[in-house]
Image (cartoon, grey):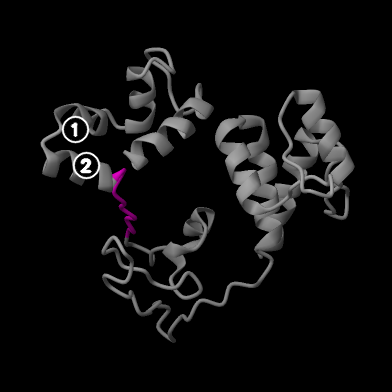
């Protein structure tokens, strides 16, 4: 990992979570439990009673409690401590197998060890265009929902999709979030209704 990125992540997390990450970058479980208790944030436990500190647990918490997001990011950077070893050619170009139609949904599925745009989202900013050129990274937003809405003729689902954030709009329609609610103002409701919408 780039040392400067790790340093910034540690500094920010020390500001928000005093005592949880020490000066050497070590995570203190007891301090984390105390922080969660103080903020009223649930802290899932293992059968041993120790806090669950795995990536999935932190991701789920961050989806619902915005105060956990910086810590989730800092722990993710710490876990991704390997050096970048993407297979760049002598010409500075990255070429790898895209594995077209490899996933169950028919998407390409290149290896995240070889294709930098499949690695963590924050790493995309390390890609630069040659001088005098530009680089565009374009992705679909909720592509599966858009296809489902069009193929099924479901006009309400299409309106959800066209609103730009179908999950929070679904939560608003269901009465779980107020009109004007956003991903930032109602992260828990959005996360819950995202699961419901995708299941439907």
Quadrant of the drawing holding the C terminus? top left
Q: Is residue 18 magenta?
A: no
Q: Quadrant of residue 94?
A: bottom left
Residue drawn where x is 66% and y is 71% of the image: 82
Magenta residues, dominant SS class = loop
Task: State how many labels appear.
Answer: 2
Where's the N terminus, which quadrant? bottom right
Let me know if residue 165 appears in the view.
no
> What residue would you read off at disc 1?
158
Task: Give the label on residue 181, or none.
Answer: none
Left or right for 47, reference 102: right
Residue 140, given in percent of the width and then of the height, sits at: 29, 48
Residue identified by numbered label 2? 146
Q: Is label 1 in a helix, a strand or a loop?
A: helix
Visible in this render: residue 101? yes
Q: Is residue 188 toward the left or the right of residue 52 in the image?
A: left
- Name the residue located 26 percent from the left edge and 28 percent from the top edge: 163
Circles 2 and 1 in contact, beta carbons < 8 Å: yes
> Residue placed farthest to the front in the image?
47
Q: Is residue 137 above or below residue 30?
A: below
Q: Nearer the viewer, residue 138 or 50?
A: 50
* 136 within the magenta span: yes
For the residue carrying disc 1, how many other residues have a C-alpha within 10 Å: few (<14), some (14-19), or many (20+)? some
For disc 2, the neighbor class at 10 Å (few under 14, some 14 to 19, many from 20) is some
Pick the front one: 170 or 23: 170
Q: Nearer the viewer, residue 110 or 150?
A: 150
Q: Could you give the CA–CA distance between mark 2 and mark 1, rounded to whole angstroms?
A: 7 Å
Residue 138 appears at what percent x and percent y? Answer: 30, 52
Label 2 or label 1, whichever comes before in sequence order: 2
* Magenta residues (range): 134-142
x, y percent for residue 199: 36, 41
Residue 120, relative to residue 100: is it above or below? above
């Amino acid at each position: 990992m780039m040392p400067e990125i790790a340093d910034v992540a540690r500094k920010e997390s020390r500001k928000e979570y005093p005592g949880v990450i020490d000066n050497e970058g070590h995570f203190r479980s007891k301090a984390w439990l105390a922080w969660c208790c103080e903020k009223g944030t649930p802290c899932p436990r293992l059968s041993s009673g120790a806090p669950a500190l795995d990536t999935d647990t932190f991701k789920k918490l961050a989806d619902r409690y915005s105060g956990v997001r910086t810590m989730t990011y800092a722990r993710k950077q710490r876990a991704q401590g390997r050096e970048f070893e993407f297979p760049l050619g002598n010409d500075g170009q990255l070429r790898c197998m895209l594995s077209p139609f490899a996933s169950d949904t028919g998407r390409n599925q290149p290896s995240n060890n070889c294709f930098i745009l499949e690695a963590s989202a924050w790493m995309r900013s390390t890609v630069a265009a040659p001088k005098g050129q530009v680089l565009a990274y374009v992705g679909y937003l909720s592509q599966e929902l858009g296809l489902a809405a069009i193929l099924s003729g479901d006009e309400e689902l299409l309106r959800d999709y066209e609103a730009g954030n179908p999950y929070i709009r679904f939560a608003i329609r269901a009465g779980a979030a107020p009109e004007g609610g956003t991903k930032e103002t109602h992260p828990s409701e959005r996360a819950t209704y995202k699961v419901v919408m995708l299941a439907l």
